[in-house]
Amino acid sequence: KCPAVWTKISKDLTKKFLSNGQCNPSARAAIREVFHDCGAWNKALGATGGCDGSLILAGELARDDNKGLQEISDYLQALALSYNVGVADMIVFAGNHAIVTCPMGPRVKTYVGRIDSTTPAPRGLLPDVNAPAADLLKLFQDKGFDERDLAALLGAHSTSNQFNFDTRPEKKGLPQDTTPGVWDVKYYGQTLNPPQGIVVLPSDAKLSKFGKVGKEFQGFVDNQGKWNGKFEDAMGKMTLFGSSGTKGLIDCTDAL
């Protein structure tokens, strides 16, 4: 049974992540945090690394990949400490909580019981915004994802504002779709046909038109239900990176 402490944590996170009925910058940072702790993994690492808290506990925040995550990391580490829970679990729980805090966001299956690690993740396992599409697909395939998973995971950029990719003052903080406070599929259509006032990452632009990934990507345009289902599956898979499946973990989805 899920420890009652997670229900309390959930209340704190809602206060932190919700502003005027939408998910706010702290929520967006928490979603990115999961990708950067869990996602720095591939199949060769097996039941090590992945969602292990090393983003916070092993100095990975100093890496360029992880710029902009210091503030949310400090908050989550302090919260984990005050409730006496693990940092790895806190990162995953907070990210999935942030997703469901966004209007229309799905409830991703959420487990706790991971072991924290102070061993840094290998470098080069997170996507580079300037990499060719084929390299990005290979990077994700090495993590056990297929084209549909990759296309679905990109949609998390629905609630993204960029600060570190294009540092020109007029581009600072621009969103990747026109509704960054809502978990919607506008991102898909707008990446393919960008309106004024958004930023499209080169990696997203390339993948949106690349072979089977592009086909899957275009299939999410105006299709909220389809995207939510596929995203839930892919995110559920990612939050088990570094674990031996769900063995020894406890389902806390209901506490979100």
Image: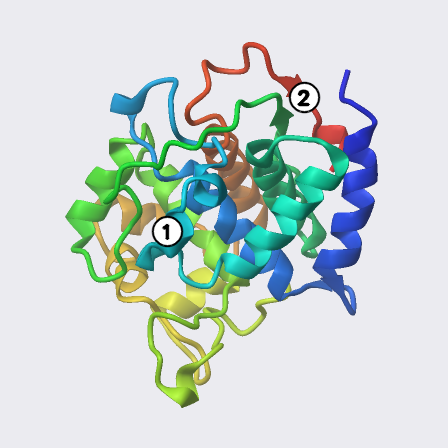
Up the image or down, 256 lies above or below 183; here it is: above
Q: Nearer the viewer, residue 62 or 225?
A: 62
**Is label 1 or label 2 in front?**
2
**Contact check, label 1 and label 2, Cβ < 8 Å:** no
Protein image colouring: rainbow
Up the image or down, 239 lies above or below 32; here it is: above
Query: At which x and y percent is residue 213?
Result: 29, 46
Task: Please indicate, yes or no, whether residue 152 appears anywhere in the rendered image.
Answer: no
Residue on which the image places disc 1: 217
Q: Nearer the viewer, residue 180 or 122?
A: 122
The circle on residue 37 is: none
Residue type (three-letter) at the residue carrying disc 2: Asp
Residue plotted at (52% across, 28% down): 116
Quadrant, the N terminus = top right
Query: At which x and y percent is residue 185?
Result: 52, 58
Task: Please indicate, yes or no, whether residue 83 appears anywhere in the rendered image.
Answer: yes
Residue on which the image places disc 2: 251
